[in-house]
Amino acid sequence: MQQATKERIMRRLSITHRLFLLFACVVTPVVGLAQAVTFTASPNPVAPGQTITFTGTTTLSVSATNAKVTLWFYTSSGSYVGSASETGINFVAGQAHALSISYATASSLAVGTYTYNLSYYNSSGTGLSGASGQTDDGSFTVGASSGSSYSITATPQPANPGETISFISSLNPNVTATDATVKLWFYNSSGAYEGVAAVNGVNFTAGQSTPVTLTFPVPSSFANGTYTYNLSYYNSSGGGLATGKTDAGSFTVTSGSASTACATAVVVGLQWPTVSTATSYTVSRSGASLGSTSLLAYVDQTVAPSTSYTYSIEAFDGSAALSTKTLSVTTAAATLTGDPAYCPSTAIASIAPNWSSGITQLNGSDLWSQTLGSDGNQYGFFGDGGGFGGSNSPYSSFGIGAITSATDGSLTGAVNVYGGLSGEHTASISGKATGILEIGPSTSMDFYALAGVSNETSSQTKGGANDQEIVYSTGNAWSWTDNASSWTFCTNGGTSTNFCPTIFLQNGAGYSGNTDGYVYMYGGTEGSFFGTPPAGTTSYTYLWRVSTAHASILSDTAYEALTGFNANGTPIWTSGSFSTLNSEMVSVFTDRGPRPLGLSAVTYNAGLGRYIASAEGAVNQVAFYDAPNPWGPWTSIGYFNSNPNDNSGGWGNLGEGIALSSWGNGSRGDGLGINFVDKWMSTNGETMWAEFSSDGNASSSASLSALSGQDMDAFSAVPLTLTLP
């Protein structure tokens, strides 16, 4: 496949300019705020030569792309010593943005206290208009402390009985030790012992603070009240290591209080019990309103790592305020490989690939978007190759293959229906499809593709097209017609905010599981599909729908866009011209992480009664989510992102030993879709299959042995085990 085509498909869902509606709640943006930001420095104090990281959240009153934030460091006497920056930032006016700036202190830096100023710059490197910086924004200390020190923050606070509390700590016992143990001993207000939390394998360096997080599941039998804790250190043999601290802190347990579903580096999930007669709840953070909802949950995706926040949830009966619950939350530190965009699922405990049972057919074809036909066959689009059993010769630009075997994981009997090796029908068009769907009974199977056709009279034209539209085949899978002459969704060089759909929702054989009469399609914008979003750009996914009637699918006046949610979390659908839909659509899935992953496929798992979605960046960056509805609310069930330093790990360890500079750049390691093979889904829904492809050779250490060192331009699939709570 040509480089430009692969790049646009790989980035098809990284959209850069919409506000996300959090957890199916109507969010009221906060605009016109000052640029004040308070950073948390960690570790602090820092030893000379050690790296210190400053995390915080800022809200600007102006928008900017590819901006830069710089901290300027000074001694106590005002002498300049250095600076550190975060670059490639996209600010949206009135929207909070998490910052993380690391500064490698010089080994010659003198012991003492240092201050820093904050500055904002535009993409040209000059001051960002409308975003004033700050002088004396904060300080940090360099040098080993003369004695032991500690800081411990309990989160959330207060906590409910049965909830888990995290004690996020920075500890300096002023000794050097390896494989040490840290314990917190808990006592009630009468001094009676109630429990202990411990962490093993901690390494300390004398005079330096070490981050340590301990967790304590509060027993459901705990009474309301305040509990204290003592801090203790132990060496690797279990003996005392250093002087601990009695009455090192306290936490509060209150039944019926607000609580957290999660508090990661990128998302905080809030939940609370119902308040009698309440009709709505307004959620605020540090005094700024985030939004209102009638639900009992809310998700905040605008947080920064290792940052403390105070949330308030105010209950209303109409306009009359009833009560307010407050909750103090400290987010976790960012993990090396990143964090899921949403809180963990309560319906599915995990999803895990079984690489030893995976399959690979090295056939020189890629993309392989999937749909389950009403005849029981699994149909897939393949691009630039020979399809099942083929290679790059004979070549088809736009082909359709079918899996016929009733045995899970078997390609025996797989055929090429349209184009490819020994194709049952000769391919006649060229182009690329990112999504495919079959609708109707086996006697009248209509196929639809979200695709761009580059040549309507030849199957030999390489690469994709400069537009995305409906391509259809009526009554079978081999009579494809391009609808571009009537209208398209988006066109390269057109309006960058236009919707570019890339995938269809899958729901049973021949879409028979659908009950509301609508076809759903997910996608990003034209700018993300054809463009090159800056690294770290937030990934937004939008949702449109149309009647399953053939005439409606081919009519550009029949579509609706999801444009919001009411206070009950019910989606609001807007009809009208594409111009109206493009201007009013809102995101249904957002990943604001440092390496965001966009939705790649969504299917309904009837056995579990959940919608299952895959998300992908490069081919070794994959995540899975679930939801009760096609529009969410989404929760995380599996996260397989690679190590950003050496490209190892992640999905299938496909990039280990391969330089990042030559990965995911249009020639090797690009993400070309994580597709579900629904024909192989178990009746109880606890086993699914995920297909993937890419370009270039996989690592020789790939988890799927048949793909190790081989060209990923192939059909590869792996079974997934879904574990219930």
Image: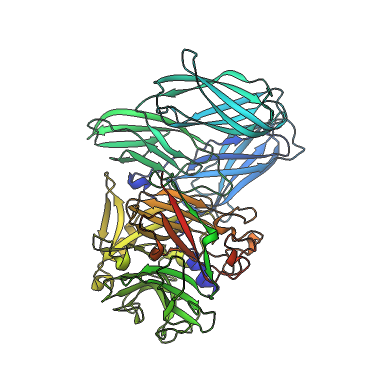
694 relative to 555 in the view: left or right: right
Q: Position of residue 597 (x, y in %)?
A: 48, 56
Q: Does residue 584 lie above or below 419 as drawn?
A: above
Q: Does residue 85 lie above or below 401 as drawn?
A: above
Q: Residue at x 60, y 52 (%)?
A: 643
603 relative to 209 in the view: left or right: left
Q: Does residue 473 lie above or below 582 as drawn?
A: below
- Figure quadrant of residue 256: top left
Q: Position of residue 413 (x, y in %)?
A: 44, 76
For residue 15, say whether it is visible. Answer: no
- Figure quadrant of residue 669: bottom right
Residues 283 and 179: in front is 179
403 relative to 42 in the view: left or right: left
Number of disc labels: 0
Q: Residue reaching furthest right?
A: 108
For residue 586, say whether it is visible. Answer: yes
Quarter of the rendering occupied by the C terminus: top left
Q: Position of residue 457 (x, y in %)?
A: 41, 87
Residues 330 and 519: in front is 519
Colouring style: rainbow
Q: Does residue 158 lie above or below 552 as drawn?
A: above
Q: Residue reaching furthest top?
A: 190
Q: Position of residue 8 (x, y in %)?
A: 49, 68
Q: Residue reaching furthest front?
A: 407
